[in-house]
Image: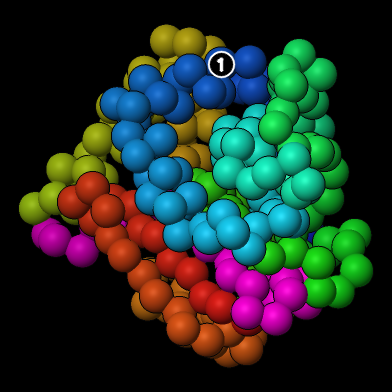
Amino acid sequence: MQIPTTFIEKAKFVRVIFTDVEKEYDQLLRLLTLGLDWTWRRRMLSKIDRARSTCILDLACGTGLVTFALSKTIGSQGLVIGLDPSASMLGPAIRKKHETRAQCPLEFVRATGEFMPFRDDIFEYETIGLALRNFGDKSAAFSEARRTLVDSGWLLSVDFVVPDKSLIRKVYMFHIFNVLPALGQLVSSSWHRTLVYLARSIQLSTEPAEICRLLSSQGFRRTFSERISLGVVALVGGQK
């Protein structure tokens, strides 16, 4: 599978990739990650200081898994916004919003992280859950994050990466390129396509150290990276 590298073409490509998988997304993600996806998200959410969190943006929010978890993190006076370019993925999130009573105001916006429809200096935190690989222009997204964060605000991301240890890397790459697409084929052709993309996007993922360098180049400080679960996932972040 060839993944476009330019922003516009990749944005279109990713929207197609995540079409027709939204209904099973939450359940299959948990199954395919053996339930570890919530371990990774909780690690990211543990970095959020609840005392100073009144306005949080969840970038590339998809079906809202992180967005709804964030709504439980801050009080009733806060605001959580989920942003995603895919109408298909936002559909379940919007339906869930109407079906549940969030603990704080909760909104969903269709847009890309590279071009956000928000004014400057709004959010205390911005999060990206298992989706940084999907951005067509990470530098533009980091620039927009810095613009929309308040002074001392944090950008946090947790995402799949290539393991740094050789044996683990070989086993992992065989798993994502062979086992996961085969399981996806049992569900639907759409899921097979999405899991083939997942494998290829992980193979092409940016190293955590390079993510920190990109954050620094956009004016972030106190950047950090932590590998999780044998190095298959990395938590990275930086402060405005």
Asked which colour scheme the image uses, the reply is: rainbow
Please tell me which residue lies in front, 132 or 121. 121
Q: How dense is the environment of label 1, judged by Cα within 10 Å: few (below 14), some, or many (20 and up)? A: few
From this view, report whether residue 141 is shown above or below residue 64. below
Q: Nearer the viewer, residue 178 or 239?
A: 239
Looking at this view, is 98 or 114 the one in front? Answer: 98
Quadrant containing the C terminus in the rendered view: bottom right
Q: Residue at x 81, y 32 (%)?
A: 87
Residue sitting at 78 percent across and 77 percent down?
147
Is residue 100 shown left or right of residue 158? right
Q: Quadrant of residue 176?
A: top left
- The three-letter amino acid code for the residue at tag 1 is Glu
x, y percent for residue 239: 56, 78
Q: Quadrant of residue 144?
A: bottom right
**Is 64 colored magenta in this rendering?**
no
Q: Is residue 230 above or below residue 26?
A: below
Q: Is residue 89 left or right of residue 49?
A: right
Mark 1: secondary structure: loop
- Is any atom of residue 186 visible in this view? yes
How many circles with numbers are drawn on the protein? 1
Residue 157 sits inside the magenta stretch: yes
Residue at image x 31%, y 65%?
226
- Return the residue found at the far left: 167
Circle 1 sits on which residue? 24
Task: Decide: is 196 above or below 210.
Answer: above
Estimate the x, y position of residue 166 in percent, counting from the top left: 12, 59
The reply to whether residue 67 is in sight is: no
**Magenta region:** 145-166
